[in-house]
Image: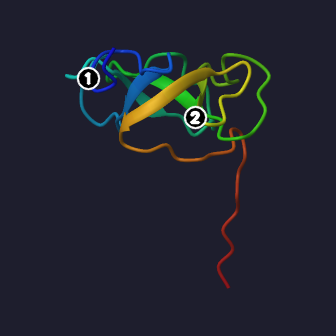
Amino acid sequence: MSISSGMYAADGSFRVSIVNGSSYTGLYAADGSLNVVTSNGSSYVGAQHPCGALWVTYCGSAPTIGIRAADGSLNVSTSPYYLPNTHPVTAVSGSFVVTTPGAVIPILVP
């Protein structure tokens, strides 16, 4: 199995293309990977973004409670730190933004 196209990487994880959701992309990228939009966890979003991609929450190395985040998106993690209760993914396009779902970080201006 080639890791350069299709939905699955050689290690069995989902291949994902990270998109910003500003225009319609659909669920699948041209190379067969899944299009995903990273959720910031600030409000409920559900499973699918209006652009057709899946909403995901990147867990990094943080432990998770379930396969879905509180905002309805899918919890995902990347190699080498595949976490229990997350979907293992391999990013083939774009990069994940590490967020803390539900956290509000104030910016103080002097």
Q: Which of the 4 image quarters holds residue 40?
A: top right
Question: Vertical placement of 87 versus 99: above or below?
Answer: above
How many numbered marks does the figure carry?
A: 2
**Residue lying farthest to the front in this orientation:** 1
Q: Is label 1 or label 2 in front?
A: 2
Residue in view at x 65 percent, y 41 percent: 60
Name the amino acid type tagged 2. Answer: Ser
Of residues 73 and 60, the one drawn nearer to the viewer in this rendering? 60
Which residue is at a point 70% across and 51% down the rendered structure image? 104
Instruction: Provide the secondary structure element on which disc 1 rests.
Output: loop
Please state the horizontal and vertical placement of residue 22, each as a whole percent of the image.
Answer: 29, 37
Q: Residue furthest bottom?
A: 110
Q: Which callout, 1 or 2, points at the residue further toward the start of the chain?
A: 1
Bin the neighbour count of mark 2 within 10 Å (Cα to Cα): few under 14, some 14-19, many 20 and up: few
Locate residue 45, reporting x and y percent.
54, 24
**Amino acid tagged 1:** Ala
Q: Which mark is residue 79?
A: 2
| Residue 38 location (% of width, % of height) | 49, 35
Instruction: Classify residue 87 as left or right of residue 31.
Output: right
- The numbered mark at residue 68 is none
Badge 2 marks a residue whose secondary structure is loop
Going 37% across and 21% down the picture, which residue do you hit? 53
* Residue named by callout 1: 29
